[in-house]
Image (spheres, rainbow, N blue to C red):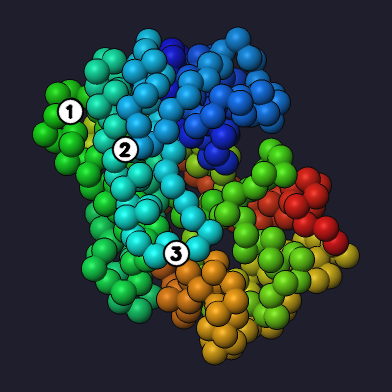
Amino acid sequence: MTGTALVTGGSGYIAGYIMRQLIGEGWTVHTTIRDLAHEQSVRDVLAVDNARLKFFAANLLSDAGWAEANARCSHVVHVASPLARKNPKNDDELIIPARDGALRALRAAKAAGVKRFVMTSSIVAIAYGHGNKEQTFTEADWTNIDSPDAYSYVKSKTIAERAARDWIAAEGDGMEYVSVNPSLVLGPIMSGDFSLSLESVKKLLEGSLLGCPDIAAGIVDVRDVADLHVRVLTAPNMAGERFIASGPSLKMIEIARILKSGLGAEGRKVPMRRLPDFLVRLSALFDPLIKQVTGELGKVRRMDASHANEVLGWLPRPAADSIIDTARALIDHGVVKL
């Protein structure tokens, strides 16, 4: 099945791969960006059939442009959501655009007669606020936003997904809603404008870390995340579904070992020792990105993605392949200079 689908946040990492796959499979794609002055640069990066791709100016905090973007669309993939390099002083800086943007996109989709609305959520809406012990999480779990480890981004994704589900229950009137909840998204980049999710690999490659913090994350490839979205878009009986998109949970030192063994001389700067927790906390005083994740020290969250495999036949590629592909793309695009 093909048709016309809206993919929001068209300049983003995940959205780019979703649009490439949809257009490659014969869909016409509408997409939103905040400023149409950037349309040509996005087209240049995507390198798809331009006749099947239409751009609309819209942002998460205004109604302008949403009706036009949804017109003639049967499906929506809502990827757009705010992300900050450091934890904001006020949680609402992320919560309001994430929640209100999702509701704005839902209302516009419903008014346009959209049949299915797929939302990119996150495992941070599932696996936070459950204590420090090693645990395995499924789609039945929800983050406790009152926990100390629920920083602003965690709260924003959790609140936005809950608000979307509540809206569908109250006002959806038959429009199907599904969420895809990825873990740490790695994989090749299309240009030098790279996603913050790749920052850890970048820092390891360029040797800007003295060692590897005792931090773990589930790894998933951006190409597999896009593929899961496309499967969810067309599979039958999806109303209310929720799908974790994740491979294995790896510690930073394990990612470093994969880079070291897979890159040869290009991996020469990758640190191979674990960084003591006190040094991580010291580094956080000077690096806002590190400060944001100091609460993750020592924690291991394992994500059970078997539901996506059982229902949709989805299976992520090996994490080592994604890690090496990430590194090579960062080097090839000049993001990391060795």
Going from N to C along the chain, the mark reached first, 3 or 1, is: 3
Q: Position of residue 132 (x, y in %)?
A: 35, 79
Between 327 and 284, which is closer to the camera in this rendering? 284
Going from N to C along the chain, the mark reached first, 2 or 3, is: 3
Q: Residue at x 71, y 50 (%)?
A: 325
Q: Residue at x 42, y 43 (%)?
A: 81
Residue position for label 3: 87
- In the image, is 125 to the left or to the right of 230? left
Q: Quadrant of the N terminus?
A: top left
Residue position for label 1: 172
> Looking at the image, is 141 positioned above or below residue 135?
above
Determine the image quadrant of residue 167: top left
Q: Residue at x 62, y 64 (%)?
A: 200
Query: What amino acid type should be assigned to the residue bearing mark 3?
Result: Asn
Q: Position of residue 208 (x, y in %)?
A: 72, 72
Q: Position of residue 306 (x, y in %)?
A: 38, 50
Q: Pick out the residue farthest to the right.
A: 265
Q: Secondary structure at mark 3?
A: loop
